[in-house]
Image: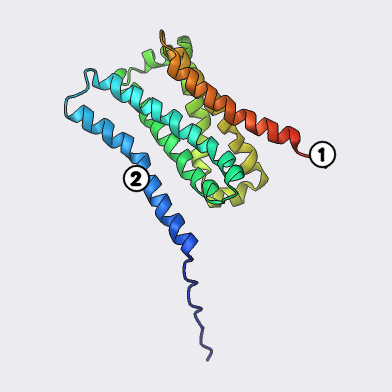
Amino acid sequence: MTTLSMKPAKPASAADRRLAIGKALLFIACLLPLSRTAWIVLSGAAVNPIEFITRSTGTWTLVWLLATLSMTPLRRFSGQAWPLKCRRMLGLFAFFYASLHFTTYLWLDQFFDWHHILKDIAKRPFITVGFAALLLMSPLALTSTQGWMRRLKRNWGKLHRLVYPVAILAVTHYWWLVKKDITQPLIYAGVLALLLGLRLWWKWRRPSP
């Protein structure tokens, strides 16, 4: 009769512990805007609760999207690996806030009036591009696990390049929504242009095989 020997688990390194703590703090930080929104609405401080929820969830969708795109430049400039290990969490939170944003529109704004909703999506450009962004984000969220990375192999990276048109559509959605002061949409557009421009620069400078 043979006995199975169990190898002791490898103790976590100091770097692993710091990463785990950092990711836990990032998770909490990503939930803070939602907690703040809930507190303001429930306390009665919001003049127009539905509009406030819609604007807040939309704004934080953009913030987390741009934060996701900033992880690669941060990795290159810092020489550290941890930004790439936080990228998936940020991307999932971007999708989470986008889903809340759209759900607020469907439920609290339109009361699931599907005829009016479909008419809105077809005839109001800012809603059309916002809906398109959410549709493109959905497969990215669904395939964000290690299992899907193994299944899709090289195609996983190709699929997740959809984050670039998603970000462009999201900024366009916000820009077209704002009717007067476009200062904030312009800031988001500038940050996005910088993040995409860096990628194009690196690709252009990459030596040919």
Please state the total of marks drawn on the protein image: 2
Q: Which residue is mark 2?
A: 28
- Between 117 and 201, the one lying in front of the other is 201
Relative to 50, is 152 above or below?
below
Residue 18 horizontal side relative to residue 73, left or right: left
Relative to 149, is 53 above or below?
above
Residue positioned most to the front: 78
Q: Please provide percent x and percent y for residue 110.
A: 31, 17
Q: Earlier in the sequence, mark 1 or mark 2?
A: 2
Residue 84 horizontal side relative to residue 104, left or right: right
Q: Which residue is mark 1?
A: 208
Asked which secondary structure carries label 1, the reply is loop
- Between 202 and 54, the one lying in front of the other is 202
Please say whether residue 108 is visible from this viewpoint: no
Circle 2: residue type: Ile
Circle 1: residue type: Ser
Asked which secondary structure carries label 2, the reply is helix
Q: Please provide percent x and percent y for residue 184.
A: 43, 19
Q: Please provide percent x and percent y for residue 118.
A: 42, 16
Relative to 70, is 106 above or below?
above
